[in-house]
Image (cartoon, rainbow, N blue to C red):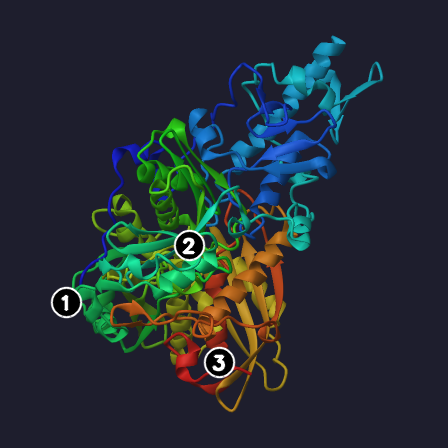
Amino acid sequence: MNKHVSPRMNRRAFVIGTAAVGAGLAIGLDIPFGGPAVVRAADGSPEVNAWVVVRPDDTVVIRIARSEMGQGSLTGLAQLVAEELECDWSKVTTEYPTPGQSVARRRVWGDFSTGGSRGIRSSQDYVRKGGATARMMLIQAAADEWKVPASECTVDKGVITHKASGKTTTYGKVAEAAAKLTPPADVKLKDPKDWTIAGKGLLRLDTTDKTTGAMVYGIDFKLPGMLNAAIKDCPVFGGKVKSFDDSKVASMKGVKKVVKIGDSAVAVVADTWWHAKTALEALPIVWDEGDNAKVSSETIAKWLAEGLDDAQPAYVGNKNGDAKAAIAGAAKKIEAVYNYPYQNHATMEPMNATALYTADKCEVWCGTQNGEAAFAAVLEASGLPAEKCDVHKLMLGGGFGRRGMTDYVRQAVAIAKQIPGTPIKLLWSREEDMTHGKYHPVTQCKMTGAFDANNNLIALHYRLSGQSILFSVRPEALQNGMDPAAFQGVAQSGEAAFGYSVPNLLIEHSMRNPHVPPGFWRGVNVNHNAIYMECFMDELAHEAGQDPLEFRRKLMGNHPKHLAVLNAVAEKIGWDKPAPQGVYRGIAQVMGYASYVAGAAEISVTDGNKIKVHRIVASTDPGYVVNPAQVERQIAGSFVFGLSALFYGGCTVKDGRIEQTNFDSYNSMRISEMPKVEAVMVPSGGFWGGVGEPTIGVAAPAVLNAYFAATGKRIRSVPLRDQNITFA
């Protein structure tokens, strides 16, 4: 079994730091706010600082470096800036700066990476300071004009007032003067309890354009004279192009050129994408599939199962006491093995990018979760220096972690480089998108729990076997070979910490990396770790003859925030009261992305295999809530993702290739199958957690635990379609 190893970027591609490989770059609190000269937006309006442009008509343009892919970061970040700016929210609009502009200005906008539910939580401090700084400069400009102390001036919705004289002015009138001022060194942020714009369920800024069709996604983008490209990579990961006969398609309608991309792909360029795709399908290609063509889901499963053996090496991610010794001497023990499959991101908009290359300039227009990573990919693929490249970020038709990768950007530039001076739009077919993803890693887990004579849990051994995402995409982030991200949700400490206290604990990872490339799939390792741990917690509770909620509570005394969200969902679902007749409940909790989350489900089962999910309650403590309406939507959306994966998801491997090629074999739940979702927000303050991903993790175990309550059967393998279990 071959390990998948990613090629390392050359030094030029690291010009913007570790963000180039999708990790993000740590940003201090002293980010420069621009130079002393007035910087102007494209329409000539003055930039007060990097985050705030004020037009003469009082429109405020807020610059957003993070990507919007449906999660609401664009609106949430604008709320945080506008809150400190104290402008008129009805006059706020947004725009994306480019990574090229940011690099040229010493990365003034900070980190562009949008993943790991970091969009708001890891930039909230400096974007708020951007708004507060601009407010202070605008007030100072008005005070200077009136020759009064700035401390005597107030602002409300962009109108500055000097109460003593009765003078008023607006941001639009003083923006030019404010842009010339030196930014203040000391900036104080508001206490969240005083928020009037942030913390409110305001309407999203991008809804109108989306509903009217005005929004431009990468798939919509056009340039004059643009040609279209369709691409086919070797169906077996790691395989190569052996040969192809372009003469067979050269005379087909619209075809302009057939090009080889790297060692493993072939693209057809034509006047329309349909002509390109049609010719590509007719193109005779001979592949050198290599040894990976011998790999199947069965061989991968066998290899992973071997990793569950204690005799095999493993990395220890969380440990206290001596779990193995305690288990050996226990009055009673139970054991279970669970597994979780590959999952595809399956974004509604397939991967695409438009590239224009000349000897002096290379530009790309695309949806990306990390403009800087895409920028680094353009530098490397084009061979041009940073000052001659840029990436123009467009709205994403779904990301879920997939558009944090840059393979499609590199391909677009590589094609454009062979047809210089002509814009080339590369669009992957749905089949290409399904079979050449960066998949949620495949894993198995063996768990052993032990009790004393009084049914107290005295030991827990959690042995994970499977892929490491960081090994593939960020090997420099490994810690002495260990992937710390593999322990999300069961880690000893940090933003995805284990929420139980067990006297003897051992949580370890036997790293095994098949050739299918893994990636950051929404919720990432929390998804399978939550299923394994929370379903096994139910197994332990049942073995001990205890209520699943009470069993957990006994182990959570040292984890008050974990316990608080668990109690919140238990109260909301009515755990202490009988469920309606024929309805059964399940519960789960986990920590991910610095947020504490819990879920409780109510289901009914007919014929033993048809599940109706009536209701799911989710509780979250993300520290602070910027837009509660968006949090509710994110929780509901996360359950669509989590339940679709539970019931329908899962990618299988045959002859080295992914078998699922479209939505007919990789399904998603329908509106009629969606349960009622109730969100309980219990922000405790003092920290900033994520929202978009954490609650995915509790959807599946809550339903699986409810299924056991209904039927007495444990399901330890996902997806449910493979167990002949469907939605009712």
Q: Are marks 1 and 2 in contact (CB under 8 Å)?
A: no
Q: Looking at this rendering, what residue extends furthest in the left direction?
A: 311
Mark 3 vs mark 2: which is more N-terminal?
2
Location of residue 373 (image quadrant): top left
Taking depth in this image into account, of 310 and 421 the one nearest to the observer is: 421
How packed mark 3 is, by other alpha carbons closer than 10 Å (few <14, some 14-19, many 20 or more), is many
Gap in Å between the C-alphas at discs 3 and 1?
A: 34 Å
Q: How many marks?
A: 3
Residue 284 visible within the image: yes
The residue carrying mark 1 is 311
Foreground residue, 579 or 694? 694
Q: Which mark is residue 402?
A: 2
- Which residue is at the far top? 147
Between disc 3 and disc 2, the foreground one is 2
Is 566 displayed left or right of 455 in the figure? right
Quarter in which the N terminus is drawn: bottom left
Can you give x and y, in whole percent of width and height, for residue 497 in the image?
39, 54
**Upstream in sequence: badge 3 or badge 1:** 1
The residue under label 3 is which amino acid type?
A: Tyr
In the picture, residue 287 is in which quadrant? bottom left
Q: Where residue 64 sits: x, y (%)?
A: 55, 37
Q: Amino acid at mark 2?
A: Arg
Q: Which residue is mark 3?
A: 707
User: Distance from label 3 to label 2 (Cα)?
Assistant: 31 Å
Earlier sequence position, callout 1 versus callout 2: 1
Give the percent coordinates (x, y) of residue 176.
66, 17
Q: Relative to the observer, which residue lies in front, 345 or 434? A: 434
Separation of disc 1 and disc 2 at Cα? 35 Å
Check disc 2: other Cα within 10 Å, few if <14, some if 14-19, many if 20+.
many
Name the spot of residue 462 as percent of width and height, x first.
29, 66
- Depth check, front residue: 154 or 85: 85
